[in-house]
Each structure stands twice: as C-alpha cells, then as structure tokens.
Amino acid sequence: MTEPSPPATDRPAATDAELLARFRSARSRPRGSELVDLDIIAVDQAAKQVEATFAAKEDFSNPMRQIQGGYLCAMLDEVMSIACMVASGMTHVAPTLEMKTSFLRPATLGQRLRGVGRVIRWGKTIAFTEGELYDAENRLIAKASGTAVPTPFAKYK
C-alpha cells in the first residue's frame, strides 16, 4: 500500500536552504511565534522535518520557576505545524485537530530550547505529526504526537 503524498505543486521546487532562508526572512510572523521567540534553524523536505529554537522566558515560568507546560505545548505545536507546511510544498496550513504531550523533565528558564517536528504520515484528509523539545544540554524534555487537518492556503484565508 502506497502512502498518500502531500499535494503536488507547479511552482519550482525550493531547496532546503532556500526554504529556510524564506522562513528566516519573513517580514510578518504570527504573534504566537513571536511570543515563544521561534527561530527555524533547519528544514529537511525529504524527511518532512523542521528544527527550531525557542526562548525559555521568565514570563513562561510556573510557581516552581520552570517553564509552564502550556508554553512547551505551544512550541511543539509550532514545529509540528511548520513541518506540515514544509511537507505540503508550502501550499497548505495544518490546523491541529488533537495533540498529546508527555513531559519528561522540567524545562528551566533562561536557555534556548530546541524543537524538532516531523510529519510521519500524510493521509487524504489528516496528517500525523510528532515533535520533541530538548534543553540546552540536549536532554529530551517533552514529546508530542498530533493530528492536523491540511488545508490549502487559499481555502484557509
């Protein structure tokens, strides 16, 4: 059985480096991306994967002076959603339908967290995603799986 592919596009294919440059030079970014200080650092279209860093800001702290889990979920949601955009050839957005997150260790303040998001299966109407967050010492702090609904940009606007 062949797995469905993301939609074909008639636009010339961009290299991973060109796509990364496009993300990094974007003039307007969603406010949520700005809030968590998203910085995309790698794109791998063949693997349907992206890598990014995020700020572990003081504003995100819980009473134990660690990053509150909801902010970690937002970071994971960012990398998984962007991986869907990359997998679609930049033709679709992918609103999250559901997401499950496991928190494995606390995320401490004042460091950059690294997130990896990937599409593990692109179906006819649903994309299945995974994401991980790592601390500055490259220890896994949270892991998520999700489902998203790929939607052409034209239909979403």
Image: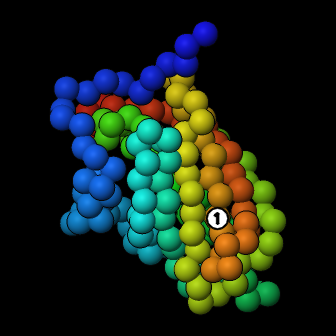
Q: How far across and down, in percent of the image, does residue 133 sit?
A: 64, 64
At x 26% / y 27%, what residue is drawn? 9
Which amino acid type is shown beneath numbered disc 1?
Leu
Query: In the image shown, does 63 or 55 lie closer to the viewer?
Result: 55
Tell me which corner region of the image, top left, top right, bottom left or bottom right, holds residue 7.
top left
At x 63% / y 80%, what residue is drawn? 136
Residues packed near mark 1 inside 10 Å, few (<14), some (14 to 19) or many (20 plus): many
Q: How far across and down, in percent of the image, does residue 35 sit?
A: 45, 74
Which residue is the site of mark 1?
A: 133
Q: How far across and down, in percent of the image, does residue 80 sit?
A: 54, 49
Compared across the picture, whether 127 is left or right of 10 comes to: right
Is residue 56 positioned above or below 69 on the image? below
Q: How far across and down, in percent of the image, does residue 123 sit?
A: 54, 23
At x 50% / y 19%, what residue is drawn? 4
Residue 126 visible to the viewer:
yes
Q: Secondary structure at mark 1?
A: strand
Is residue 100 positioned above or below 22 on the image? above
Is residue 141 positioned above or below 110 on the image? above
Compared across the picture, whether 81 is left or right of 27 comes to: right
Tell me which corner region of the image, top left, top right, bottom left or bottom right, holds residue 2.
top right
At x 43% / y 48%, what residue is drawn? 44
Quarter of the figure with the C terminus: top left
Residue 32 visible to the viewer:
no
